[in-house]
Amino acid sequence: MEKERAFPHIRPELFKQVWQALKKGEKGSDSRWSYMAKSIETHKEFIPFLEGKQKTLPPGAPDPFLHLTLHTVVEELLAENELPEIGYFYDIQKKHGLSHHEIVHMLGAILTTQLFTIFKEQKFDIEFYKQILKEYAHYTPDVFWKKIEEG
């Protein structure tokens, strides 16, 4: 039996298809497509990977497809507004003067910290995630990134 993917609806092939459509000026018909397109447009440095022109990463560089996937998931979480704690985090960081893109990266970092637990324990502790969002919302970016690094 094939192991289920963490984000089964988002695959590298889809990002490549979205990029090809964007180049032609086409638009997708669903919201996920638009989140993927927004992620690509925000990170044009990943286009060589989407076009198959680049296959290797410089040392320390993020995986383009994982990065775009996290962007897409965070954009979807923000848009769907199912977790008020995400909006709470976003609003407080926005008041601190951070850009949308910086906040998306912060929310992606919080989500990434939870992925290890999800994969290890095969469950997602939504209450713990909400608690982290509420707590970390009040940190300045310097403190936030230090806390993320500490785990």
Image (cartoon, helix red, strand yellow):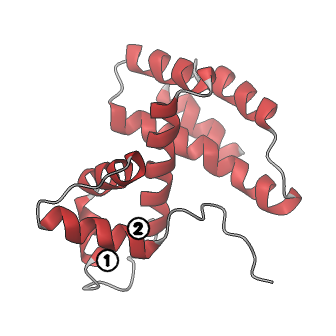
Snapshot quadrant of residue 150: top right
Residue, disc 2: 64
Q: Is residue 44 left or right of residue 129?
A: left
Kind of residue sitting beneath label 2: Pro
Q: Is residue 81 left or right of residue 50?
A: right
Kind of residue sitting beneath label 1: Phe
Residue, disc 1: 49
Q: Residue at x 32, y 73 (%)?
A: 16
Q: Residue at x 80, y 53 (%)?
A: 117
Q: Is residue 83 visible?
A: yes
Say above or below: 124 vs 5: above
Q: x, y percentage for residue 45?
A: 25, 64
The 10 Å Cα crowd at callout 1, few under 14, some 14 to 19, many 20 or more, is some
Q: Is residue 61 visible?
A: no
Q: Is residue 68 left or right of residue 4?
A: left
Q: Are marks 1 and 2 in contact (CB under 8 Å)?
A: yes
Q: x, y percentage for residue 111?
A: 62, 45
Q: x, y percentage for residue 142?
A: 50, 32
Snapshot quadrant of residue 6: bottom right
Q: Residue furthest front?
A: 29
In the rendered image, which quarter contains the N terminus? Answer: bottom right
Task: Look at the numbered disc 2 and give the secondary structure of its residue.
Answer: helix
In the rendered image, which quarter contains the C terminus? Answer: top right
